Amino acid sequence: MRLEKVLTKIQYSHKIFYKMDTIDWSNLSFGYMKTDYNVRSYYREGKWSEPQLETSEYVNLHMAATCLHYGQEVFEGLKAFKGKDGKIRVFRVRDNALRMQSSARGILMAEPPVELFEEMVITAIKKNRRFVPPYESGASLYVRPLLIGTSAQVGVKPAKEYLLLVFVTPVGPYFKEGFKPTPMVILREYDRAAPLGTGRYKVGGNYAASLAADEKAHKMGYSAVLYLDAKEKKYIDECGPANFFGIRNNTYITPESTSILPSITNKSLMQLAKDMGMKVEQRRVPVEELATFEEAGACGTAAVISPISRIDDLAEKKTYVFCEDDKPGPICEKLYHKLRAIQYGDDPDPYGWVTVVD
């Protein structure tokens, strides 16, 4: 069911009001729905402004802003969940703040203070709390912090002024199949990021570089592309919007590379795997090693875990199969449900990952 058909809208002044009881939470796409407020802070003359609430979905930009010409743009993605107890929880806010700082340093942008980032994320969730989907609906509130260079610059130089903006929108599963195995493909004629480039930063250009390959994969019936390292085409990098992991002999194996975005979800899964008594290896993973994995998956904030049914290496005419019964493997399933239980507050959070939004 299309989102437009499940919403009843009443336009009034600058806000759109929804009849919340008409929203089909269980059938939301991973798309965009207007919410009530976003939060903004401006960096000018060497300091950040106090956060301010906005109702407009639009940003007024100079036509020579560095974000438009030279890619000075970084972003983050978080999720907020409503628990069985009615409380709203957001996952690993501080880690996302630190990763945004790393990305900003990587392309010479002003770094938002961790405390400012945290305040803006919490405020955005609080002011839009009616859009947090119900417990067990399968949906969540996606939180998107965005940092852009806004001052005019024609020469290739970093901006002097920046905007940090946080908006939210309720979403369904990133992969339409949800927590079910999906096929992926290796397209050796495409690279996601250069080995010593911006691959380890969450910048828009990395995602632009993957659009053509992803579009081709989707038309061929695959959910995503599994990228190999750009230098030698010998090692696994990541699955476009997510990190890759494989399971073998009670060992959680995930690639290490200078062109991989350090996934906060992957970091969480590695901790959970250790606590489950598994061995964890983060290292270079030769593509041939795919043949030895009992299970494989893609992980990230958007997808959480997406089990992989098979990977086709078209150029080499090889297929690696991880499940034949259309069901996730036992370890993928255990990791997925454990992480979700912590995110929703069903299980204790001994790691301090969750922030409760009062």
Image: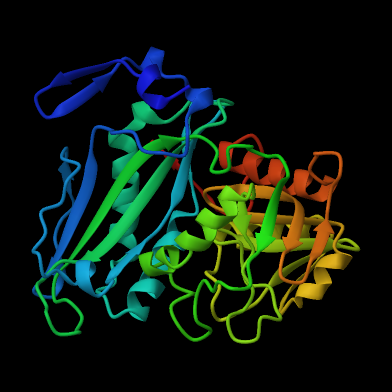
Quarter of the image with the C terminus is: top left
Q: Residue at x 20, y 84 (%)?
A: 156
Q: How is the image coloured?
A: rainbow
Nearest the eye: 131 or 319: 319
Vertical placement of residue 54 versus 22, above or below: below
Q: Nearer the viewer, residue 137 or 213?
A: 213
- Is 354 displayed left or right of 273 in the figure? left
The residue nearer to you, when weighing 306 against 138, is: 306
- Image position, residue 250 (x, y; %): 88, 61
Q: Residue at left 15%, top 56%?
A: 50
The x, y position of residue 178, in whole percent, is 63, 37
> Residue at 21% of width from left, 25% of height from top?
16
| Quadrant of res 296 | bottom right
Residue 182 locus on image (x, y percent): 70, 46
272 lies above or below 191: above
Q: On the rendered structure, is 280 left or right of 349?
A: right
- Seen as rendered, the residue at the extreme right is 249
Residue 90 pos. (x, y %): 46, 44
**In screen coordinates, is 153 left or right of 30?**
left
Seen in the picture, residue 290 relative to 4 is either above or below; the reply is below
Residue 72 in which image quadrant:
bottom left
217 left or right, relative to 172: right
Q: Which quadrant of the structure image shows residue 314? A: bottom right
Task: Report the number of numbered marks.
Answer: 0
The residue nearer to you, when weighing 6 against 54, is 6
